Image (cartoon, grey):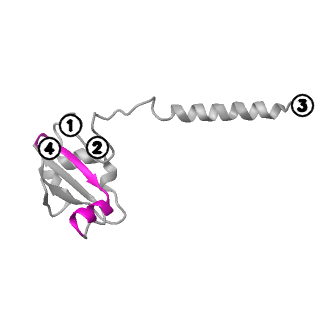
């Protein structure tokens, strides 16, 4: 039987690459609070930032919600549409129960047109 030394080198390199990729995930688990996700900020996360307002909390925890090529997200507080997302600056973290982000498609399906930047839904305590 003929052996090919390059096969063992290739196998080792592949195993090394796959092993490194597995470690890059962060060690086997999310550091977010239970119930939190990329589209949801829960009260446990907000409790860690008691001196901030809602806008600052989003900047700290999910800055991506505020970055859109298509425009700013529309803000809803307890189901009522607000003028602009910056209205979150007037809401203290201690008054917020949770915040959710909806992509443009879901926001348009739920609320109608004018949501090219998505929507941020805030539920107060």
**Residue indicated by mark 4:** 96
Q: Could you tell me which residue is drawn at 19 percent across and 44 percent down?
A: 98
Nearer the observer, disc 4 or disc 3? 3
Q: What is the distance, in whole Å, between disc 2 and disc 3 at their CAs?
A: 59 Å
Q: Mark 1–mark 4 contact, CB under 8 Å?
A: no
Q: Secondary structure at mark 2?
A: helix
Tell me the magenta residue range: 93-112
Dot label at residue 99: none
- Per the model, the C-alpha gap separating discs 2 and 1 is 9 Å
| Residue ID at (17%, 50%) | 122
Separation (CA) of disc 4 from disc 3: 69 Å
Instruction: Give percent across and percent down for residue 118.
Output: 29, 60
Q: From mark 1 to mark 4, how far is it between C-alphas?
A: 11 Å
Mark 1 falls on what kind of element? loop
Query: Where residue 25 sits in the image (x, y, percent)?
Result: 47, 35
Question: Left of 75 or right of it: where is 7?
Answer: right
Q: Indicate which disc, 2 or 3, sits on the residue closer to the N terminus.
A: 3
At 18% from the left and 47% from the top, the residue drawn is: 54
Distance from Cα at disc 2 to Cα at disc 4: 15 Å
The residue at the far front in this view is 1
Q: Nearer the viewer, mark 2 or mark 3?
A: 3
- Numbered label attached to residue 49: 1
Q: Which residue is mark 3?
A: 2
User: Callout 4: helix, strand or loop?
Assistant: strand
**Residue 37 image offset from top left, x and y in percent:** 32, 42
The quadrant holding residue 2 is top right
Q: Earlier in the sequence, mark 2 or mark 1?
A: 1
Query: Which quadrant, please, contains the N terminus?
Result: top right
- Identify the residue shown where x is 83% and y is 31%: 5
């Amino acid at each position: 039987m003929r052996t090919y030394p390059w096969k063992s080198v290739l196998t080792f390199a592949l195993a090394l690459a796959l092993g490194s990729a597995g470690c890059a995930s962060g060690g086997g688990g999310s550091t977010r609070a239970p119930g939190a996700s990329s589209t949801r900020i829960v009260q446990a996360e907000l409790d860690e930032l008691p001196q901030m307002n809602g806008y600052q909390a989003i900047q700290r925890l999910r800055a991506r919600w505020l970055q859109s090529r298509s425009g700013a997200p529309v803000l809803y507080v307890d189901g009522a549409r607000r003028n602009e997302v910056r209205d979150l600056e007037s809401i203290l973290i201690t008054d917020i129960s949770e915040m959710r982000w909806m992509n443009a498609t879901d926001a348009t399906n739920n609320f109608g047109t004018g949501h090219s930047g998505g929507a941020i839904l805030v539920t107060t305590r």
